[in-house]
Image (cartoon, rainbow, N blue to C red):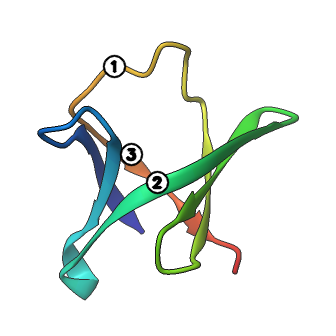
Amino acid sequence: MKVMLRQNSVGHLVVYVAKKDLEEEVVSQVEEENEKILTLANGWELAIAGLTDPIQLPQTVEAKRIA
């Protein structure tokens, strides 16, 4: 699914999923092999491949929901 990554007004990373009309703050990030696992405030976990550090914001990326 396509998601948009951006920063909110207090500087936290936020994920917006247009198809679900969902906007949630990222509460944790884990680096695994060649992808980042982002855990959202609602409990979702998204795997995103190819993100560089530091993350260029805003950007739209392809993500896979794993939990």
Q: Residues within 10 Å of mark 3 (few under 14, many from 20)?
A: some
Farthest bottom residue in view: 20
Q: Does residue 9 lie above or below 65 as drawn?
A: above
Q: What label does residue 56 carry, if any?
A: 1
The amino acid sitting under disc 3 is Val
Q: Residue at x 42, y 69 (%)?
A: 1
Question: Closer to the N terminus: mark 2 or mark 1?
Answer: 2
Q: CA distance from mark 3 to mark 2?
A: 15 Å
Q: CA distance from mark 1 to mark 3?
A: 11 Å
Secondary structure beneath label 3: strand
Q: Which residue is mark 2?
A: 26
Farthest left residue in view: 9
Q: Position of residue 37 (x, y in %)?
A: 68, 51
Which quadrant of the figure has residue 23? Answer: bottom left
> Nearer the observer, disc 3 or disc 2?
2
Q: Which residue is mark 3?
A: 61
Farthest right residue in view: 33
Q: Residues within 10 Å of mark 1 (few under 14, many from 20)?
A: few
The amino acid sitting under disc 1 is Gln
Question: Closer to the N terminus: mark 1 or mark 3?
Answer: 1
Q: Position of residue 16 (x, y in %)?
A: 26, 62
Depth check: give the residue in front, 12 or 30.
12
> Nearer the observer, disc 2 or disc 1?
2
Question: Closer to the N terminus: mark 3 or mark 2?
Answer: 2
Q: CA distance from mark 2 to mark 1?
A: 15 Å
